[in-house]
Image (cartoon, grey):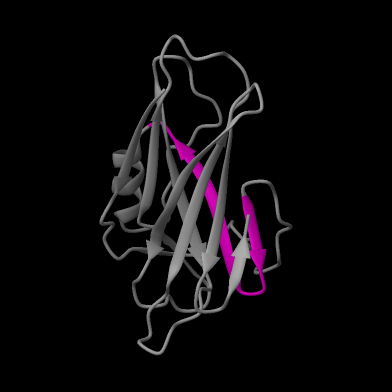
């Protein structure tokens, strides 16, 4: 499996939280495997087969319809995208959010990808979801074993001392 780490300088972009941690009527939505929260801090891990198209779509005006996937075939790649909201600003008014990625293979083995920065931008206003800066792209060769691979993202708001997995 080829591993490419892409640390994208994503433009300051935001979206009203509409379907992440509250529904369209502002009611809380329960946590899921890919979307979790701790108080006001929330994170959603999204997989896409096209990170550039995902970012381009995110940066367009209006409510985006993002290209996502739940599966990848041998010979294809998949990228992780992190959406987040509610990070606590530091004294400088900026977020300090980090992520550790881990991939669990079908045989149960685990690969760690180290810690990368999700955001050091100005903290978004309440109710605004942002696209994080950290992207990991994995290419699955034809020799990779078939089965279920699980991405685990452990995201930490360093200012608030909150961690979500």
Residue 162: image quadrant is bottom right
Front residue of this view, candidates 92 and 125:
92
Name the residue at 45% across, 82% down: 89
Front residue of this view, candidates 42 and 160:
160
Drawn side of residue 30 relative to residue 52, left or right: right
Residue range in magenta is 35-49
Above or below: residue 81 compared with residue 141: below
Front residue of this view, candidates 44 and 26:
44
Above or below: residue 156 compared with residue 140: below
> Does 45 lie within the magenta span?
yes
- Give the prevailing secondary structure in the magenta stretch: strand
x then y, percent, for residue 106: 63, 22
Can the viewer see residue 59 in this picture? Answer: yes
Residue 5: image quadrant is top left
Drawn side of residue 89 relative to residue 30, left or right: left
The number of numbered badges drawn on the structure is: 0
x then y, percent, for residue 85: 51, 68
């Amino acid at each position: 499996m080829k591993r490419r780490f892409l640390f994208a300088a994503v433009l300051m972009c935001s979206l009203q939280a509409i379907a992440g941690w509250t529904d369209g009527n502002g009611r809380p939505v329960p946590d899921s495997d890919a979307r979790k929260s701790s108080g006001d801090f929330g994170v959603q891990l999204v997989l896409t087969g096209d990170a550039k198209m995902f970012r381009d779509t995110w940066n367009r005006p209006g409510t985006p319809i993002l290209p996502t996937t739940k599966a990848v075939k041998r010979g294809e790649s998949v990228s992780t995208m992190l959406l987040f909201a509610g990070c606590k600003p530091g004294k400088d008014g900026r977020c300090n959010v980090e992520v550790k990625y881990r991939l669990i293979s079908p045989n149960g083995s685990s690969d760690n990808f180290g810690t990368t920065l999700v955001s050091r931008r100005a903290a978004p206003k309440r109710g605004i979801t942002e696209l994080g800066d950290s992207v990991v792209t994995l290419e699955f060769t034809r020799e990779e074993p078939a089965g279920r691979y699980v991405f685990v993202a452990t995201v930490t708001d360093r200012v608030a001392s909150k961690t979500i997995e």
